[in-house]
Image (cartoon, rainbow, N blue to C red):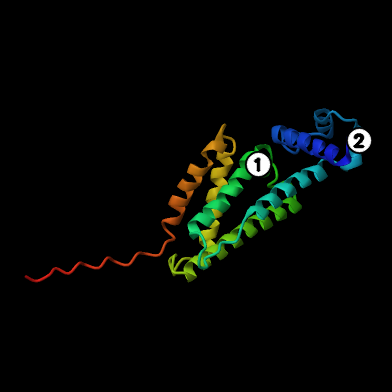
Amino acid sequence: MKPKLRREQILRAATTVFAAKGYHRASITDIIERSGIARGTFYLYFDGKREIFSELVDVLLARIINCMKRVELGPGSPPWTDQIKANMLRIATILIEESELTRILYNHAPGLDEDFDKKLREFYESLTHRTADALRLGQEMGLLRKNLDPVLAAHHLVGSVREVMYHFSATPGAGAKLSPMIDELMSYSTLGLLAPRPPAKAKKTKKR
């Protein structure tokens, strides 16, 4: 087997083992047995389970960051709500497709050690920063409330999506329900952000 395919084989096996047992209870032996390889072969690719766990988390976080697109509000751009929904849908799709990695990210990565905690903080800070930038653009365009705190609102949006996806990613057949779920999230998340509509002008009645 080619080195690249062998490495992917080990990573897939480790994903299943970590998702089932967690980081601390999983062992190199578990991963080797799941991979169906010799112990010496494992060490040709990885020094230990800490290294392989780190790579799994790094790959998932990179996929999520890279799938996000900047919200554009120029002439001819799609509605900003559609662009945010598309970002949320892309993130949710990755988390559902990689459900085992998602469980690892939520259940086993936080609190593992100082380096992992820093990695996760930087990841969520990046998501929050990008979301806050999109909200500022919405304020500049007059779409969102002028007194809106974009950073606080961004924390709310990222946090609510994170919590929903934690439960949703473990739901059987969740992939078919992604779009309605994102619609619902967008509905209740954006209602409090929108700029108030100007009052409708009363129609003048003609004097007879």
Q: Residue furthest left?
A: 208
- Front one among 24 and 94: 94
Q: Earlier in the sequence, mark 2 or mark 1?
A: 2
Tag of residue 102: 1
Q: Position of residue 182 (x, y in %)?
A: 50, 46
Q: Is residue 50 left or right of residue 118?
A: right
Mark 2 neighbour density, 10 Å: few (under 14) some (14–19) many (20 or more): few
Q: Residue at x 57, y 60 (%)?
A: 131
Q: Residue furthest right?
A: 40
Q: Is residue 156 visible?
A: no
Q: Answer yes or no: do the residues labelled 2 and 1 have beta carbons within 8 Å?
A: no
**Mark 2: secondary structure:** helix
Quarter containing the N terminus: top right
Q: For residue 172, which quarter of the picture? A: top right
Cα distance, mark 2 to mark 1?
27 Å
Tag of residue 41: 2
Type of the residue with mark 1: Thr
- Front one among 203 and 22: 203
Q: Position of residue 141 (x, y in %)?
A: 47, 69
Q: Residue at x 50, y 60 (%)?
A: 80
Quarter containing the C terminus: bottom left
Q: Is residue 129 left or right of residue 3?
A: left
Q: Position of residue 43 (x, y in %)?
A: 90, 39
Tag of residue 26: none
**Mark 1: secondary structure:** helix
Type of the residue with mark 2: Thr
- Front one among 71 and 74: 74
Q: Position of residue 140 (x, y in %)?
A: 49, 71
Q: Residue at x 63, y 43 (%)?
A: 95
